[in-house]
Amino acid sequence: MTTLDTDLSGRTALVCGASGGIGLASAIALAELGCRVTCFARDAGRLDAALAALPPIDGAHPDQRHDIAVADFFEPEVVLEAAKGAMERAGGGFDILVNNTGGPPGGPITDATGEAFLKAMTAHLVNNHNLATLVLPEMKAKRYGRIVNITSTSVKCPIPGLGVSNTVRAAVTAWAKTLAGEVAADGITVNSVLPGFTDTARLASLFDAKAARQGTDAGAVRGDALASIPMGRLGKPEEVAAAVAFYCTPAASYITGTVLAVDGGRTPTV
């Protein structure tokens, strides 16, 4: 009988947006599989709390504990420098990169400005590419690497009222698919996880903003959202994190260039 290999003992991961929500849940899931995790986000106080939530690494030396890196993802040069520092503390490289950044504000695409697109592209696509470029040499040397991008089901079916986000998420997914083909022969996989309506602070803020635009209340907006989900409930961050963690394991070694919706069946496309 074949044993599913999900052991990440001895592996290192850089998880972006790990101060809360899906990012933190992903960091915890990876740590539970034995991975040494660096939580990366802009809020040092929330990162300290996230660090305390991670399960300890069994038998780890003091210099092998989980870590944090702090930077504002609207400043790509600062992000890259912070990542370099974290990489050095991790022993010179990362085996796993989880790209995850909070989405841009909602609103119709006709109301969006060029600046809004550039800002979102910087926070998502530019940082994703810079971080991948940083970690790829060590991944290639080890012939083991996992890059997972947390995007959105909007890459399969654009979500009304999220004009900038729809555009940027699609760009990131196209980038990931292209990268997957270029590094597959090096033992590196690149995949994307597409969360649906997930119970996070980000979703709550989107519901509030939509309610304000429509002159209704957030409860009504939430009700409409629930009605669109075959499972009849919001997803949990831990449910998205389970997909992220699996992609990072040895068991997923022959899966690359894919997109996986974790959405309770909401996405209407195949």
Image (cartoon, rainbow, N blue to C red):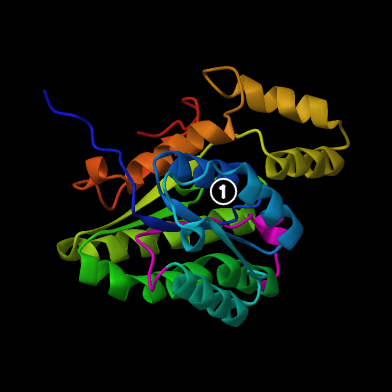
Magenta segment: 91-114
Magenta stretch containing residue 269, yes or no? no
At a point 55% along the width and 53% down the height, the residue shown is 166
At a point 62% along the width and 59% down the height, the residue shown is 164
* Quadrant containing the C terminus in the rendered view: top left
* Quadrant containing the N terminus in the rendered view: top left
Q: Quadrant of residue 212?
A: top right
Instruction: Using the image as rendered, state which of residue 78 and residue 95 is in the foreground.
Output: 95
Q: Quadrant of residue 143?
A: bottom left
At a point 65% along the width and 47% down the height, the residue shown is 52
Q: Is residue 87 left or right of residue 117?
A: left
Q: Is residue 73 left or right of residue 91?
A: right
**Location of residue 109 with respect to 208 vertically, above or below:** below
Q: Amino acid at mark 1?
A: Gly
Q: Residue 116 placed where, x, y %? A: 68, 68
Instruction: Using the image as rendered, state which of residue 256 and residue 241 is in the foreground.
Output: 241
Q: Is residue 177 left or right of residue 108?
A: left
Crowd band around label 1 with a 10 angstrom C-alpha radius: few (<14), some (14–19), many (20+): many
Find numbered disc 1 in the image and state the secondary structure of the residue it sits on: helix
Q: Residue 64 placed where, x, y %? A: 46, 59
Residue 92 visible here = yes
Instruction: Using the image as rendered, state which of residue 63 and residue 32 is in the foreground.
Output: 63
Q: Residue 198 placed where, x, y %? A: 60, 34
**Location of residue 238 with respect to 135 vertically, above or below:** above
**Location of residue 214 with respect to 147 vertically, above or below:** above
**Location of residue 22 with respect to 235 vertically, above or below:** below
- Residue that numbered label 1 is attached to: 23
Q: Residue 145 placed where, x, y %? A: 29, 60
Residue 108 visible here = no
Q: Is residue 40 left or right of residue 253?
A: right
Could you tell me what secondary structure mostly forms the magenta stretch?
A: loop
